[in-house]
Amino acid sequence: MTDTATDPTLATLLRIADALERLAPPARRAADLTAADAFVWHAAGHEFAPVTKVNRVALSLLRGVDRVRDTLAENTERFARGLPANNVLLWGARGMGKSSLVKAVHADTNRRLPAGALPLKLIEIHREDIESLPILMGLLKADPHPAIVFCDDLSFDGQDTSYKSLKAALDGGVEGRPDNVVFYATSNRRHLLPRDMMDNERSTAINPGEAIEEKVSLSDRFGLWLGFHKCSQDEYLSMIDGYVGHFGLAIEPDQLRHEALEWATTRGSRSGRTAWQYIQDLAGRLEKRLEG
């Protein structure tokens, strides 16, 4: 038997092996999604941070989005029941409740699940962590819960190539996308890329059509495209009325209408976000907490 004390070469090799083992990344732990119904994915440590209180509004308070609300709810309910469902891209006007709708539909779907059914999980992944999506999908595949992986405000600029990781994860490669995972994303862009970037790709390519095809085809990985458009004045006021009634804010109808329209005019925008910001201001002036 060789004695490491008298064999310097072997001793050196053992020290190198020990050092490499210490430098090796820790083994990936299986996902534990029992702590909460919503999590934030931290790519650096491959960890799921539970969110005990999700920042969301009730589904009934989202006005002016009836068609997309029903479509998203139906797709989500089918998925939660173990039936085939599509990845979803919610795109369009800013402040019209795209991310709010995803969170509200998630909560409403869980509320309506039959007793004993596994709850639907919502996993938020940040835009800058998209390249870790294949790892996240792999961890979720080993968990029995159905899970929505959700990325808010997704888009790609300049020479960013991380969209390739997203395409690979949505396609699923040879294995296919895990049956218990769907991907929901919100974006202000229908094709997730700015128009000038797409035009530049077309103008500098030998074959313009092929050059842009790969990038435009990213949005094709989403089976459902749900468009959000700027709301009308009536829809905006309906949002305001819904919030006022839900939170029990005492204000005369004429005063409410005048203030709400003035609020939108000074901001140059009518949207769900603008309506909510006015309600926060109103509740503060009335010394009323927004609870319930």
Image (cartoon, helix red, strand yellow):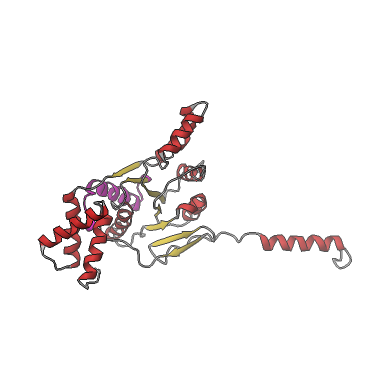
Can residue 213 be seen in this snapshot?
no
Residue located at (31% from left, 61% from top): 56
Q: Quadrant of residue 216?
A: top left
Residue located at (24% from left, 70% from top): 284
Left or right of 218? Residue 100 is: left
Left or right of 235? Residue 120 is: right
Which of the two residues, 139 or 227, is positioned nearer the viewer here? 227
Q: Quadrant of the N terminus?
A: bottom right
Does residue 71 belong to the magenta stretch? Answer: yes
Query: Where is residue 202 drawn, in percent x and y?
Result: 46, 30
Query: Where is residue 37 drawn, in percent x and y?
Result: 38, 62
Query: Where is residue 142 drawn, in percent x and y?
Result: 48, 55
Which of the two residues, 153 or 23, is positioned nearer the viewer here? 153
State the residue lying farthest toward the right: 6
- Counting the numbered discs, the total is 0
Q: Quadrant of the C terminus?
A: bottom left
Left or right of 201? Residue 262 is: left
Which of the two residues, 255 or 162, is positioned nearer the viewer here? 255
Residue located at (37% from left, 43% from top): 189
Which of the two residues, 151 or 270, is positioned nearer the viewer here? 270
Vertical side of 105 occupied by 282: above or below? below
Can residue 276 be seen in this snapshot?
yes
Vertical side of 145 occupied by 183: above or below? above
Vertical side of 229 occupied by 38: above or below? below
Query: Where is residue 99 drawn, in percent x and y?
Result: 33, 54
Does residue 124 belong to the magenta stretch? Answer: no
Magenta span of residues: 61-87
